[in-house]
């Protein structure tokens, strides 16, 4: 019965199966999501030759020489040791500075204490001499000069209360009319002594200053001065006269010409 089957039937079946396999392959390729290139076309996988892979491995390994990792770790350890040593040095320097400052401060305090002890002892000796004897003007003056000499050895200076008034070292206690002996702006007398210490005013000298009489219309007014109770020098340093009491002047009579 098989002898009656046409020969073409046997030969057409393999070709039919081959076409079906090609169609299935094309369908799978169409459904596969391939990566896209920059121009939007589909990128297809390409085989990388084995010789290219080998050459790239050789290029990378050329930088990694034997002992490279150990050398890098050693350099990092050296940097860490240097950094730690630097921190320790800075800390030691700061501690040394604090220690020196503390030592200098203690030495200054000790020196000041010793200096004060010496001054106090010498002044107490002078006061003992004043108390142990009958007080008198001569003894009081002697003790005063002795104490001033003790202080002068430590830099105390007396402010001169002579010549012209100087607002930097003098303080006005009062003003009096100027005359030929004491011109305007000159010091007439000293009310209280002034002193300087280390080129700075410790206490200004309290003085009386001569002031020129005020003249109005060529007539010299009668002026009565009172002792001021406070300093009459402004911040500018100029001498400000105390307010005088001026006697009223009679107005001149008018003269009528005939």
Image (spheres, rainbow, N blue to C red):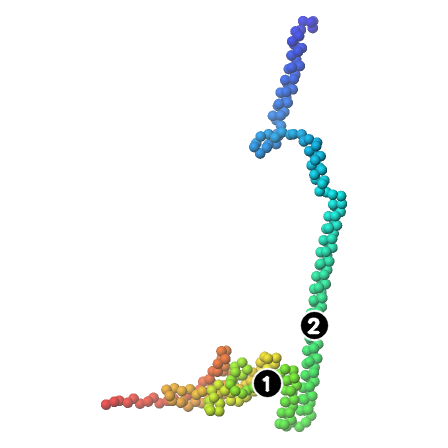
Picture quadrant of residue 14: top right
Residue at image point 73% right, 60% down? 88
Relative height, residue 133 to residue 45 (above, below): below
Q: What kind of element bears circle 2?
A: helix
Of 62 and 13, which appears nearest the observer? 62
Q: Position of residue 181 (x, y in %)?
A: 48, 91
Q: Left or right: where does residue 114 sit relative to residue 41? A: right
Relative height, residue 14 to residue 133 (above, below): above
- Residue position for label 2: 104
Q: Which mark is residue 210?
A: none
| Label 1 close to label 2 by CB (< 8 Å) | no
Q: Position of residue 47 (x, y in %)?
A: 67, 30
- Name the N-terminal-most of marks 1 and 2: 2
Q: What kind of element bears circle 1?
A: strand
User: Label 2 neighbourhood size at 10 Å, few (<14), some (14-19), many (20+)?
Assistant: few
- Residue position for label 1: 158
Picture quadrant of residue 56: top right
Q: Position of residue 231 (x, y in %)?
A: 51, 82
Residue at image point 61% right, 26% down? 31
Q: Left or right: where does residue 46 sit relative to residue 215? A: right
Most distant residue in the left direction = 258
Residue at image point 38% right, 89% down? 219
Residue at image point 61% right, 30% down? 43
Of 248 and 7, which appears nearest the observer? 7
What is the distance, in whole Å, between disc 1 and disc 2 at their CAs?
32 Å
Residue 78, visible in the rendered structure: yes
Q: Position of residue 258 (x, y in %)?
A: 23, 90
């Amino acid at each position: 019965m098989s002898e009656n089957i046409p020969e073409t039937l046997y030969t057409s079946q393999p070709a039919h199966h081959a076409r079906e396999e090609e169609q299935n392959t094309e369908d799978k390729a169409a459904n596969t999501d391939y990566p896209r290139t920059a121009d939007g076309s589909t990128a297809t996988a390409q085989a990388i030759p084995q010789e290219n892979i080998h050459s790239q491995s050789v290029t990378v390994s050329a930088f990694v020489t034997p002992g490279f990792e150990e050398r890098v770790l050693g350099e990092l350890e050296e940097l860490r040791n240097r950094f730690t040593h630097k921190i320790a040095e800075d800390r030691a320097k700061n501690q040394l500075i604090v220690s020196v400052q503390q030592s200098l401060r203690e030495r200054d305090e000790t020196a000041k204490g010793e200096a004060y002890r010496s001054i106090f002892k010498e002044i107490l000796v002078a006061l003992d001499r004043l108390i142990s004897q009958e007080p008198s003007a001569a003894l009081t003056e002697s003790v005063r000069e002795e104490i001033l000499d003790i202080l002068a050895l430590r830099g105390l200076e007396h402010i001169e209360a002579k010549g012209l008034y100087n607002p930097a070292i003098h303080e006005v206690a009062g003003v009096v009319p100027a005359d030929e002996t004491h011109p305007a702006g000159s010091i007439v007398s000293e009310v209280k002594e002034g002193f300087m210490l280390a080129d700075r005013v410790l206490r200004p000298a309290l003085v009386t200053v001569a002031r020129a009489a005020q003249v109005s219309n060529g007539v010299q007014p009668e002026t009565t001065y009172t002792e001021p109770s406070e300093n009459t020098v402004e911040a500018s340093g100029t001498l400000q006269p105390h307010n005088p009491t001026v006697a009223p002047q009679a107005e001149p009579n008018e003269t009528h010409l005939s």
